[in-house]
Image (cartoon, grey):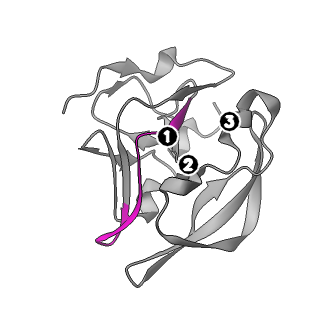
Amino acid sequence: MTLPAENVQSYPRPPTLEPVTHEIRVELGDAPVAQSSAALRVLETHHAPTYYIPPEDVVADLSAAPGGSFCEWKGHAAYWTVHAGGISAQAAAWSYARPTPRFAALAGYLAFYPGLMGACWVGGVRVTPQPGDFYGGWVTPNLQGIVKGDAATRHW
């Protein structure tokens, strides 16, 4: 499958939320974690899209992980350890229990760090993690422009 070309530099700021038209799949090792045709994605300037999966489409076990973070757009995030196929990935997913009104549709949805999972796919296309150790965007070959995340872009 070929995804349509998108330029991350033309994504909006403040970010926007939109439904995903492709199936999203996540695995840990060889075990399924999630599969959804009802995911949402957040698009923000210079970021790879971040995909959020409805909780009913997550088949892995989750346990609360220590810590959390704050996004000026979405609010306070809680982190989750993902357990599937006898493997655990610490703080590999996050969610917003009470996101800001603009992102209310994300309540309870889960996002996964692709670098901590075995594999993630958008419409059958395997993703790579957004550069750096903080952002959870999913990089696909159709993305054009500079994706923020490595040390040289940290304070953009």
Which residue has dot 2 on it?
A: 54
Tell me if mark 3 has few (under 14), some (14-19) or many (20+) residues whose alpha carbon lies within 10 angstroms of its own. Answer: some
Which residue is pictured at 45% across the width and 46% down the height?
131
Residue 33, magenta (yes or no): yes
Which residue has dot 1 on it?
A: 39
Residue 85 sits above or below residue 49 on the image: below
Identify the magenta region. Answer: 27-42
Tell me the quarter of the image containing the C terminus.
top right
Q: Label 2 vs label 1: CA separation?
A: 6 Å
Residue nearest the observer in this picture, 34 or 94:
34
For the stretch drawn in magenta, the main secondary structure is strand
Which residue is pictured at 53% across the width and 36% down the height?
40
- As shown in the figure, which amino acid type bears the numbered disc 2? Pro
Tell me if mark 2 has few (under 14), some (14-19) or many (20+) residues whose alpha carbon lies within 10 angstroms of its own. Answer: many
Give the percent coordinates (x, y) of residue 11. Answer: 53, 19
For residue 35, side relative to residue 82 (left or right): left
